[in-house]
Image (cartoon, helix red, strand yellow):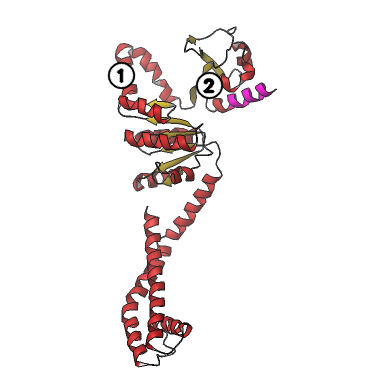
Amino acid sequence: MAISGSIRQLLLSVLLLVGLTFLGALGLMVTGDDGFFRSLYLTVIILTTVGMEAPTSDGQRVWALLLMVGGVGVVIFATGQMVSFVVEGHLKQLIGRRKVTDRIHKLNGHFIVVGFGRMGQALCATLAYREQAFVLIELDERRLRNAEELGYLCIEGNAMQDAILGEAGVDRAQGLVTCLSDDADNVLITLTARGMKPELNITARCDEAGTEPKLRRAGADRVICPAVIGAARASDQLLNPQVDDMLELDGLWPDLELSRISLSRFPGFTSRSLGEVQAIIGDRVIIAALVRSDGTRIIHPKADEVVQADDQIVFIGDTGCVSRMVDVLSMSAAA
């Protein structure tokens, strides 16, 4: 990161200046009869070219000459770094990064996106459109700058490191998506995140279909393989072009949510009918399917279908309907 490099150069210049000052003071002590404090005082006078007092012995004068000649370069370098740090806006960037860090620390129940490639960019855009809080982790400086210009909360670093995931608030997050181009990196990030928060909802990308079992074993709840999804869409387009044209409308309706929720989170709804559930969640959400615990799917279920333990509801609604459904179901189950 550019600002980190500037800080390193600034710290290096300060350390060189401090080291030269103390080395000069020790040299004046050895070559003269002055104590450490007076030697330090003389060294500062020499390096700052104030010239109020002069060394008292020939040895000190020789050492002072060396300080004058050798110290000029260090002082100029240190001063230049300090001026550059302020003038070039690095100080402002540092303050800005601190504000971003403070905002991330205040997040709770947010999402973490790892990687700002094509999939990461589309995912971040969707989350931002739906006003969902998220933190992006990206290692590439250019991509990071692009994400920051879009107003995203970003962290530069390697998501395989516990410290970076911790900085992104993985312990407070509700979900993580790792969409790097390297399958091995996605496996390791999944393994790391799962170890830091066992109940975290993790979605991982893979380029090779053979990597999916490894991601599952590493702890991914869902695995997305663009090649497989692309092939499925291509076959749909070849076999049923009219239907595929209708499915394409989903891309034109970013305010539409198609999702699935498990009623095991709301045990109070066991043995109730779908009609009762529909009445509770309201008519802004359409129950499209019911998935039984054994995997059986009931498309367009009837209102008298009784909900069983661990059943899942597939529903369609407008943006934000998922969070509203969770709130409504939670209040109803607790009543």
Q: Position of residue 166 (x, y in %)?
A: 48, 44
Q: Could one spot residue 225 in this view of the protein? A: no
Label 2 Cα neighbours within 10 Å, binned few <14 / some 14-19 / many ≥20: some
Q: Is residue 16 above or below residue 202?
A: below
Residue 85, numbered circle: none
For disc 1, the marked residue is 234
Q: Could one spot residue 75 in this view of the protein? A: yes
Q: Which quarter of the rendered picture does the C terminus lie within?
A: top right
| Magenta part of the chain | 324-334
Type of the residue with mark 2: Ile
Residue in the picture at 39% in, 35% down = 120
Q: Which of pointers 1 and 2 lies earlier in the amino acid sequence?
A: 1
Residue 12 is left or right of residue 310, and the answer is left
- Quarter assignment of residue 223: top left
Residue in the picture at 37% in, 55% down = 2
Contact check, label 1 and label 2, Cβ < 8 Å: no
Q: Is residue 21 above or below residue 61?
A: above
Disc 1 and disc 2: Cα gap in Å?
28 Å
Type of the residue with mark 1: Ala
Eye-nearest disc, 1 or 2: 2
**Does dot 1 land on a helix, a strand or a loop?**
helix
Q: Position of residue 56 (x, y in %)?
A: 40, 93
Residue 261, numbered circle: 2
Q: Position of residue 55 (x, y in %)?
A: 40, 90
Q: Nearer the viewer, residue 66 or 226?
A: 66
Is 325 covered by the magenta stretch? yes
Residue 73 is left or right of residue 275, and the answer is left
Label 1 Cα neighbours within 10 Å, binned few <14 / some 14-19 / many ≥20: some
Q: Is residue 6 above or below residue 277?
A: below
Q: Residue furthest right?
A: 335
Residue in the picture at 37% in, 52% down = 1
- Quarter assignment of residue 24: bottom left
